[in-house]
Image (cartoon, rainbow, N blue to C red):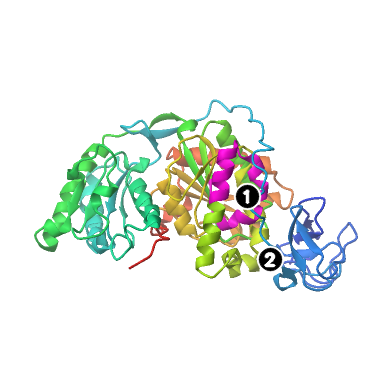
Amino acid sequence: MNTTEEPRYIKVHPADNVAIIVNKGGLPAGAHFSCGLELKEHVPQGHKAALIDLAQNQAIIRYGEVIGYAVRPIPKGSWIEESLVDMPEPPALDDLPLGNKVPPALPPLTGYTFEGYRNPNGTVATRNLLGISTSVQCVAGVVDYAVKKIKAELLPQYPNVDDVVALTHNYGCGVAIRAPEAAVPIRTLRNLAIHPNFGGEVMIVGLGCEKLIPERLLPPGAAKTDILMLQDQQGFGGMVQAILNMAEARLIKLNQRHRITCSVAELTVGLQCGGSDAFSGVTANPAVGYAADLLVRAGATVMFSEVTEVRDAVHLLTPRVADEKTGQALIREMKYYDRYLSLGEVDRSANTAPGNKKGGLANIVEKALGSIAKSGSSPIVEVLAPGEKPAKRGLIYAATPASDFICGTLQLASGMHVQVFTTGRGTPYGLAMAPVIKVSTRDALTEQWPDLIDINTGPIATGKATIEEAGWEIFRFILEVASGRKKTWADHWGLHNDLCLFNPAPVT
């Protein structure tokens, strides 16, 4: 650490009896704060120090909420590392208040637009992509081969088309296709095929004997000519050429599209965090939450997700739902995932990764309390089951697992145009179908990864920036990226993770 730097900590709520260390590299034993606190041992950056003497079994409080109980007496100034924290029980779901503290609508935010593509069905896109959907994993190799040829031989002839994206996956056969839970991956694939960024040009490649009949992925009004079956083709060469012919017919149409000025109200933004640390809930996520409020005020749709990173803070969200029906839907998704984890003989504590703990998060409770800060302060107007499309605009809870890749896939299925992704530990994660804006929680990560982080909210921790200032920066950056005027670092380097379906149904 820089020994000339003044020792600093962040206490989030007046009731907190712990605080996280701000200084890069942490602080050594003997570090003295202006309030009189003196550290009894080295405390790493982002980790918690006790602000009072904690008795055994005494509640440890951060964000004004109990994040656990002291395993043994913890003297004031000690490092509260994860082994000293017993995790509390999750909030009971049956008696939560629903909509009793609905936030008043914030004043409308007018005058903001972005440059997008208008689709034939009236929706708007932020990219002009050819999407090639698949009905079964068996065709992935052929499609990937064909996509390479399309990019090399066809795409240069159609300069207004941004890219070609293959929606390959591990579903479609060898699965219990009639199981009730099969609705989740099938709905996801159907909605991915009609993502706004594909401009309404549906193209599905199937094999011919799979359980997931390709017609199930077609939107209403689509033609069977939008489906190509490989078992009907003459050899591998015939398969590839048929895909190229089908692709070129759609590239011709997509190439005629141009950006036009669109209202922010037509934008759908997804929020996610990954590689979270103890700063997530005090810098990046609150700043994103402020930006989310700005988007909602401008009429946009904003989705936050990740059930296990909401479950332990759900009691803070149910009062914000717009009505009882929305509240019951939120509880429904929490209960669904409780059952899902129970069938796997684990609970929500399995969520917290080694990197989260290294970054100062003791458990999933602390992680969830920081995670929900992304939702800002607007009323929650709708709750989506995994892969559903929203019917309303405003702040929406879109239920997904917390896995970065599955959450990203499901938010895309729900129509996400741009994703804002906060990280404290760092990840090169990206999506091919929509840009991912990477927001760092701390200066040190941005300094380490200047060519991967798009926005740094670390200055909030040191008092050099406010949450409001960072929130406006994120809001404006979203509009620049949605308009194609700025490129995220993930897109600059072409860092795109594979799609990853959530399939809770049996595999046969």
Residue 76 picture location, percent across and down: 86, 67
Q: SS for tag 2?
A: loop
Q: Which residue is under mark 2?
A: 362
Residue 176 occupies which quadrant of the picture? bottom left
Kindly identify the residue that appears in the image at 29 percent across and 66 percent down.
Answer: 174
Amino acid carrying mark 1 in the image = Ile
Q: Nearer the viewer, residue 22 or 352?
A: 352
Q: Position of residue 301 (x, y in %)?
A: 50, 37
Q: Which residues are magenta?
A: 304-332
**Can residue 5 be seen?**
no
Amino acid of disc 2: Ala
Q: Main secondary structure of the magenta part?
A: helix
Residue placed most toward the observer, 395 or 38: 395
Q: Camera-side residue: 176 or 20?
A: 176
Q: Earlier in the sequence, mark 1 or mark 2?
A: 2
Residue linked to disc 1: 372
**In magenta stretch: residue 477:** no
